Image (cartoon, grey):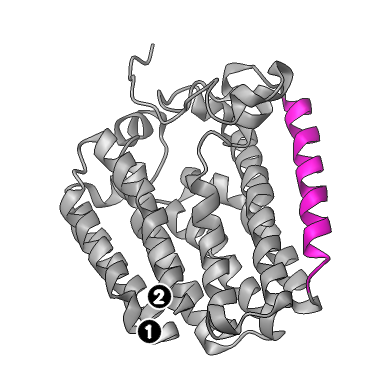
Amino acid sequence: MNTKTHTDIKREGGVEKLLPRFLRPYAALARLDRPIGMWLLLLPGWWAIMLASGGVTRMDGAAWKTFALFGIGAIVMRAAGCVVNDLWDRDLDKKVGRTSARPLASGEVNVRQAIGFLVALLGVGLIILLQMNALTILLGILSLPLIAIYPLMKRFTWWPQLFLGFTFNFGALMGWSAVTGAIEFPAVLLYVGGIFWTLAYDTIYAHQDKEDDALAGIKSTALLFGAESKKYVSVFFAIAYVLIFTASQSLFLVPAALHLAWQLHAWKPDDAASSLRVFKSNRDFGILVLAGMAI
């Protein structure tokens, strides 16, 4: 039996306690108890909308509507991605202490119920997507295969964090196209910069599970890099920052650089609680970038 007690899953608290009991497993399946994933999915899209608009003072009513739709869409599509992930991983999750209490792994929600929930979420996502221009709709459709196959990557490659980067930062392309109707060079820089940012923060996150992952045969950059992880994360953060700074050319991104330096100083790779804390702090980095772009 797995006796590992570290977990980031908190049940019967926050949003869940406000819901009827029969809906609470679905809230857990959607990770409503852990909004960090929603922020990390949303922020690249918000960066692009802000930058393509020319800053907060130049955003018109249409841009603010897009900004709000991306916020709702991130909640819905992050939830859909979590359901897809848990459908693929329900047997693997039983072998990892941190994930063994997830609704599908524990049997609290069955496969049929999870698929029904996923269809409903995708329906809402489609309604939101159809409010956008044709290019953005196309990009949204193109992102769906990434959402579907990402959870499988940990079985076949040591780089599942890279595939998460491809998936989670698609909003940078979509946000730019939603404002301008095109994909321009700054959007590509934001997308690639976001991929390296994801490589860094998800490597940090994966250090929580490296012992269980090794036993279960799950691959990750945390296991690939091992004792060299902090060096690799430093390089990924540096590349991410240079690309994001080049896209925005804003000196107001200096606080974001200082935040990355703090993360590297604070992170203790062999301490699961430290890995979770530093991982979550990437929301603050993303907000600092957004603030710099707003100015």
Identify which amino acid the numbered label 2 is placed on.
Answer: Gly
Magenta stretch: includes residue 112? yes
Task: Give the labeled residue for mark 1.
Answer: 250
Q: Residues within 10 Å of mark 1 (few under 14, many from 20)?
A: some
User: Is the C-beta separation of discs 2 and 1 under 8 Å?
Assistant: yes
The correct choice, above or below, for 167 with respect to 273 in the image is below
Name the residue: 40% across, 77% down.
244
Structural distance between the alpha carbons of marks 2 and 1: 7 Å
The image position of residue 197, as x and y in percent, is: 39, 63
Q: Please tell me how many numbered marks the rendered image carries.
A: 2
Asked whether the viewer can see residue 73, the reply is yes
Quarter of the view holding residue 65: bottom right
Name the residue: 16% across, 54% down.
265
Image: magenta residue range = 111-132
What mark, if any, has residue 204 been given in the picture?
Answer: none
The image position of residue 54, as x and y in percent, is: 55, 86
Of residues 33 and 64, the one nearer the viewer is 64
Quarter of the view holding residue 86: top right
Task: Give the labeled residue for mark 2.
Answer: 292
Which residue is the extreme one toward the front? 57
Identify which amino acid the numbered label 1 is placed on.
Answer: Ser
- In the visual, does 28 lie left or right of 218? right
